[in-house]
């Protein structure tokens, strides 16, 4: 089927689809660019994207595409690692509208779901009934049931609950052309649902119309089907034709699972639920190396664990909390009570021949350990020295008893090719994940990739294994299937595909008649020379292309649930649009550099529009497993996009806020009075590009720096350098919330320190960076470094988290060759960090009250909250602060057009936590943006931690004075 279509043909196809379906049809560059890649090494450019509203839309779209001889690619979360979620025809996005749980029957332990249902949503719905869906890949927060069926996904708990195919009861499937079939698991009856419009269920091949020739295929090849498939728990490669054997009940539903979108589109599925243990425990076992761990894993299976996961020390960069060893097994157990689960884990611990071990029952501790494992698909993309590693041989599987020898041979093969990788995965089922440092940007590296792939396929087969043990073959491995199955069985695969899809319209080039494994690589289209950029990109060798290709598509940014203490990605959760996810923006930047779909480079309106709703929260810098830093990429893009052009009004006003506030300071009372006149305020907001829903902040009558001069007087004498600390006079504290600065001075003085200011007129450049005015930002930063004087290199307390993050990261990355920039960045401390490090014996006042509020997103991403958390505990402030982003995010929430997204972000965690707070709760937010958002949307006054501490000091002082004034004191 030809992939090339003339513009007139594309237009006719788009019009026909728009007429036939009720969902969205988008053949524009943004939609196409967002779907060129999944989480693999491959890239194929589609003609357009259809987001069907229901099964009828799916059938109609398939009929139109059949009429136009255009291929179709079904797509769920787009997290496939082998390239099967990419294609050159029409992509069906099944996540936007077809994500409903139609029915959940706790009595029969089944659920009826649409293909776009997110796995975690199904698990959440099943949890109140004590049930869950057993298969749980690491992408459980964003992968879809349709994608799991297509890839026959497994996950960590397949030791106990099997693969997706083991848990599928029935499927409704639309074929290329639009006809629909109902596939029911062999030997079982369809539970009554009251749904209509389905064909009659059939449990045998002869009962299904439209699949002529399938019975003959099985009957003529019984011997081959009985002997041609290796017996192992994780055999995912190829089509599961052995499920059609008579002795296995001619199970067509099971045979469909793992077909990778090449046979049809699942429009509804009835899946089996399993009983979820009421309590779980985690035995962590340490071994000398990964081979020892692998050889120990099969011996643990008779103890009936829920999981047996393994990883080696070269994957765990910071093994804090793990018992000492070179590799670990995570063995999870379940029970009706915590004591029962612990006892089960302790039996395994005693039975295991491990160097060391421990049992963790605390849910938070378990989550922290599992996070190491779940993020491995991202963290493994970087070697310890920072070089890149890629999928491609992500999930081979061998019999569990062969895993130890296989891993030794695998490591030897890596060494023979001069490659490196960090294996980890499902040791209890012999399935290994690994990312390898192939150089896929150079011809010689691609050639090595091919040679290694061929030799590794032979090695896996020699150990009795499967080329894919979880994620499917896709383009990465389908070419090599004859090495595993032989030509005769692979020919049957082609026959099977042809019976289902005689016109080869469903995901062609995958599984049968595959593209070569070294074709369509996503790196081919990127610039061969470094792009001229302004930031230094120190973690990517100064190469913007390397920074952009950090995104490997694991899509942790696409989660729709609040991220707990995390932040990423608030704009996606507010809109649900792929273009507003970190991954989506990275894909658009990738296509901008490629120049094929996004054709106008830095001037691209598609990229600008996607970045417009990026809050620059920096959450992805810490929460993304591969450290994508979209805030920096956005600033870079805006710098180039508007170079030599008129900018939005907000860039001239809020983007240059420090200069405006310095000029306005002498006139603060008059300006505050004018801002209270509604027509004048409305006019000012309109001219300044400020959202009309916003209230203008009140300017300080006296700046913090002026107050500090009065407070200390001209004759202050510093007795020693140990008593002095430099306090950064950020723009927000100085001009908008000087009470924070005054409180910090009071706290520092109580700790025996005197606050000093750096040179006059210093500025971190935050507002210039966030609006992409990078030439101005660098000028401001250089001037700041010149004015730091003797303060440079001394501890620098920064009260505003966004300014602290700018000094810590943006400053050295915009001035990468300046040693003073790096020196200043290293000196930055929050107030809590400074007190913990330089005044460890100081005792804060005991406030003894609950707090609610939010950790600033920049602090979470760059500075961390650990020292602040410890200081809050010492001060008797109880309760946890919210994660996420407040939604104001500096200039973002003030800009015209951002009000709705800003408010939605605040409503996700921050405002609900405030409403749910108990009486007497103190509202805490160190960021000016967070405090402003709470005041304007929540109607509460939040304070900086310094303010709470200073108030406590004043209360202690008053109590002491009261105690000393009575008769007893005389």
Image (spheres, helix red, strand yellow):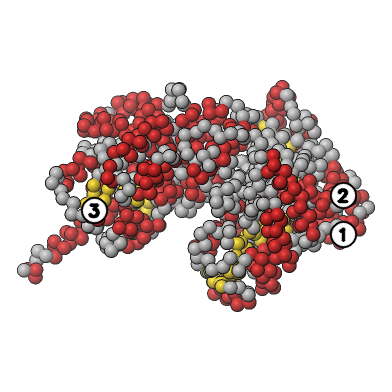
Q: Earlier in the sequence, mark 3 or mark 2?
A: 2
**How far apart are the two marked residues, 3 and 2, measured between alpha carbons?**
79 Å
Taking the spot 87% from the left edge, 60% from the top edge, the residue there is: 227
Q: Residues within 10 Å of mark 3 (few under 14, many from 20)?
A: few
Disc 2: which residue = 487
Is 753 or 358 nearer to us in this picture?
Answer: 753
Instruction: Kindly check if marks 3 and 2 are in contact, taking CB atoms under 8 A apart as contact.
Output: no
User: Where, by quadrant of the figure, is residue 88 drawn?
Assistant: top right
Is 574 or 596 nearer to us in this picture?
Answer: 596
Residue 226, label in figure: 1
Quadrant (top left, top right, bottom left, bottom right) of the C terminus: bottom left
Is 574 or 444 nearer to us in this picture?
Answer: 444
Image height of 951 relative to 27, above or below: below
Disc 3: which residue = 721
Quadrant (top left, top right, bottom left, bottom right) of the N terminus: top right
Query: Is 74 displayed left or right of 773 in the figure?
Result: right
Taking the spot 67% from the left edge, 52% from the top edge, the residue there is: 418
How far from the left and from the top, in percent, is residue 9?
A: 73, 24
How far from the left and from the top, in percent, is residue 477?
A: 75, 48
Of labels 3 and 1, the one closer to you: 3
């Amino acid at each position: 089927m030809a992939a090339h279509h003339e513009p007139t043909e594309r237009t006719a196809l788009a019009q026909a689809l728009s007429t036939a379906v009720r969902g969205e049809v988008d053949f524009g560059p943004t939609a196409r660019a967002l779907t060129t890649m999944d989480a693999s090494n491959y890239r194929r450019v589609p003609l357009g994207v259809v987001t069907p509203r229901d099964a009828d839309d799916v059938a109609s779209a398939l009929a139109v595409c059949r009429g136009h001889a255009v291929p179709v690619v079904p797509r769920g979360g787009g997290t496939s690692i082998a390239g099967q979620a990419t294609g050159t025809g029409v992509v069906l996005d099944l996540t936007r509208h077809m994500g409903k749980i139609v029915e959940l029957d706790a009595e029969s332990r089944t659920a009826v779901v649409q293909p776009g249902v997110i796995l975690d949503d199904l698990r959440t719905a099943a949890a109140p009934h004590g049930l869950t869906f057993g298969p749980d890949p690491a992408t459980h927060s964003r992968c879809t049931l349709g994608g799991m069926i297509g890839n026959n996904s497994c996950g960590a708990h397949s030791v106990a609950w099997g693969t997706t195919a083991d848990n599928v009861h029935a499927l409704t499937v639309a074929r290329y052309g639009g006809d629909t079939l109902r596939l029911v698991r062999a030997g079982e009856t369809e539970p009554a649902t009251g749904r209509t419009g389905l064909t009659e269920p059939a449990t045998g091949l002869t009962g299904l119309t439209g699949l002529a020739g399938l019975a003959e295929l099985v009957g003529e090849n019984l011997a081959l089907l009985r002997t041609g498939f290796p017996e192992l728990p994780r055999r995912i490669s190829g089509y599961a034709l052995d499920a059609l054997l008579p002795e296995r009940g001619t199970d067509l539903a099971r045979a469909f699972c793992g077909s990778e979108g090449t046979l049809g589109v699942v429009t509804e599925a009835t899946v089996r639920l399993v009983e979820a243990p009421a309590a779980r425990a985690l035995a962590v076992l340490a071994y000398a190396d990964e081979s020892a761990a692998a050889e120990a894993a099969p011996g643990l299976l008779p103890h009936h664990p829920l999981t047996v996961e393994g990883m080696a020390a070269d994957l765990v960069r910071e093994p804090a909390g793990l018992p000492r060893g070179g590799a670990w097994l995570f063995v999870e157990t379940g029970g009706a009570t915590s004591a029962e689960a612990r006892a089960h884990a302790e039996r395994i611990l005693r039975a295991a021949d491990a160097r060391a071990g421990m049992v963790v029952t605390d849910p938070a501790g378990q989550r922290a350990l599992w996070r190491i494992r779940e993020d491995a698909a991202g963290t493994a993309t970087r070697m310890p020295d920072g070089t890149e590693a890629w999928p491609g041989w992500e999930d081979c599987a061998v019999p569990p008893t062969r895993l130890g020898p296989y891993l030794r041979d695998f490591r030897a093969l890596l060494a023979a090719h001069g490659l490196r990788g960090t294996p980890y995965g499902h040791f209890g089922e012999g399935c290994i994940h690994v990312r390898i440092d192939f150089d896929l940007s150079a011809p010689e590296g691609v050639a090595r990739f091919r040679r290694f792939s061929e030799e590794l396929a032979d090695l896996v087969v020699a150990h009795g294994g499967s080329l894919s043990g979880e994620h499917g073959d896709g383009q990465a491995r389908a070419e090599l299937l004859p090495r595993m199955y032989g030509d005769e069985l692979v020919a049957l695969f082609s026959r099977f595909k042809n019976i289902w899809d005689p016109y080869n319209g469903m995901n062609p080039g995958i599984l049968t008649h595959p593209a070569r494994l070294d074709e369509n690589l996503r790196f081919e289209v990127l610039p061969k020379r470094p792009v001229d950029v302004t930031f230094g990109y120190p973690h990517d060798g100064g190469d913007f292309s390397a920074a952009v290709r950090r995104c490997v598509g694991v899509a942790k940014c696409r989660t729709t649930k609040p991220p707990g203490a995390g932040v990423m990605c608030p704009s996606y959760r507010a809109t649900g649009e792929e273009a507003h996810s970190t991954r989506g923006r990275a894909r658009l930047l990738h296509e901008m550099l490629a120049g094929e779909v996004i054709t106008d480079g830095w001037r691209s309106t598609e990229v600008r529009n996607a970045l417009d709703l990026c809050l620059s929260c920096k959450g992805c810098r810490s929460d993304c497993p591969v450290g994508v830093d979209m805030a920096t990429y956005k600033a870079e893009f805006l710098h180039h996009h508007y170079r030599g052009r008129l900018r939005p009004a907000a860039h001239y006003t809020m983007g240059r806020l420090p200069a405006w506030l310095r000029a306005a300071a002498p006139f603060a009372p008059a300006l505050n009075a004018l801002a209270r006149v509604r027509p004048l305020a409305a006019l000012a907001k309109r001219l300044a590009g400020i959202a009309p829903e916003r209230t203008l902040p009140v300017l300080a009558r006296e700046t913090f720096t002026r107050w500090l001069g009065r407070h200390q007087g001209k004759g202050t004498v510093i007795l020693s350098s140990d008593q002095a600390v430099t306090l950064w006079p950020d723009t927000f504290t100085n001009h908008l919330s000087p009470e924070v600065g005054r409180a910090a001075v009071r706290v520092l003085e109580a700790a025996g320190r005197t606050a000093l200011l750096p040179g006059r007129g210093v500025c971190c450049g935050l507002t210039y960076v966030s609006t992409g005015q990078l030439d101005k930002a660098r000028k401001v930063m250089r001037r700041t470094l010149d004015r730091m004087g003797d303060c440079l290199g001394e501890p620098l307390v920064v009260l505003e988290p966004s300014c602290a993050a700018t000094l810590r990261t943006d400053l050295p990355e915009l001035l990468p060759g300046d040693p003073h920039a790096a020196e200043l960045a290293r000196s930055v401390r929050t107030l809590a960090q400074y007190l913990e490090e330089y005044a460890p014996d100081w005792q804060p006042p005991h406030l003894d009250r609950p707090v609610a509020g939010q950790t600033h997103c920049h602090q979470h991403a760059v500075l961390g909250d650990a020292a602040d958390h410890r200081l809050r505990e010492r001060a008797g402030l109880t309760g946890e602060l919210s994660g996420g982003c407040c939604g104001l995010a500096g200039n973002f929430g003030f800009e015209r057009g951002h009000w709705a997204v800003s408010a939605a972000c605040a409503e996700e965690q921050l405002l609900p936590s405030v409403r749910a707070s108990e009486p007497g709760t103190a509202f805490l937010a160190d960021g000016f943006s967070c405090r402003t958002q709470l005041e304007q949307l929540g109607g509460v006054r939040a304070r900086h931690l310094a303010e709470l501490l200073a108030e406590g000091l004043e209360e202690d002082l008053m109590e002491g004075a009261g105690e000393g004034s009575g008769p007893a004191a005389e």
